[in-house]
Image: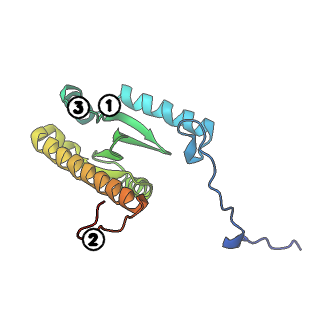
Amino acid sequence: MSEKKTLKLRDPSEAPTETPALKKKGRGWEISEKRLDALHEQAREMRRHSSEAHKALAARFAKADMGRYKFTRHAVIGSAIVDFGCHNLGMAIAIDEEGANEAIAKRRDKSLEAVGIRVMRIKAQDILENMDAVLQRITAGMRMRIGDKQEARRAHQASSRPRRPAARKGEAQ
């Protein structure tokens, strides 16, 4: 009879203290070259055969002047393809089409949020019927995300800045 094999977990104290170095663009996610190439090819195919909701929202994003923020259509983030992604904001927009698998979408959103990407879900029907309300919602989400990033930056700067003792009355600084 053969010996039963079991999964053996490493002791956390044995874990390496250094984080692995980031690889080439997109490789920091530890995705194989073959898988990443397949994802990019799939995203390219999705851009070629977009739904009406995707085309309408992409056209509005192309016309809008959003400054340094740009939404890329069918962007590859990690091992996921999002409908629209803004790298500067760490934000993704997912368009809910009828008949799409919700379980897969929720799992993808959860994994993206675990690495700091905020996902906004919008129904395709809303885009086609009420584009102005959708754009207002996206703008509000962008403002909220910009505020979150600024607050995180301020907190980081405050924690890394050395503190000087406050000057007393009558003393020169």
Residue 114, above or below 42: below
Please report whichever mark, 2 or 3, sits nearer to the chain's N-terminal start: 3
In space, the residues marked 3 and 1 are separated at their CA atoms by 15 Å
Question: Of residues 130 and 2, which is closer to you in this image?
Answer: 130
Disc 2 or disc 1, which is closer to the eye? 2
Residue that carries the numbered disc 3 in the rendered image: 61
User: Picture quarter containing residue 36?
Assistant: top right
- Please say if the residues under marks 2 and 1 sit with CB atoms less than 8 Å apart: no
Q: Helix or strand or loop: what does disc 2 sit on? A: loop
The alpha-carbon separation of the residues under discs 2 and 1 comes to 66 Å
Q: Could you give the CA–CA distance between mark 2 and mark 3, rounded to whole angstroms?
A: 54 Å
Q: Quadrant of residue 152?
A: bottom left
The label on residue 50 is 1
Q: How has the structure been colored for display?
A: rainbow
> Which amino acid does the dot numbered 3 rest on?
Phe
- Screen quadrant of the C terminus: bottom left
Relative image position of residue 26 (x, y in whole percent): 53, 39
Quarter of the view holding residue 25: top right
Mark 2 or mark 1: which comes first in sequence?
1
Q: Which badge, 3 or 1, comes first in the chain's sequence?
A: 1
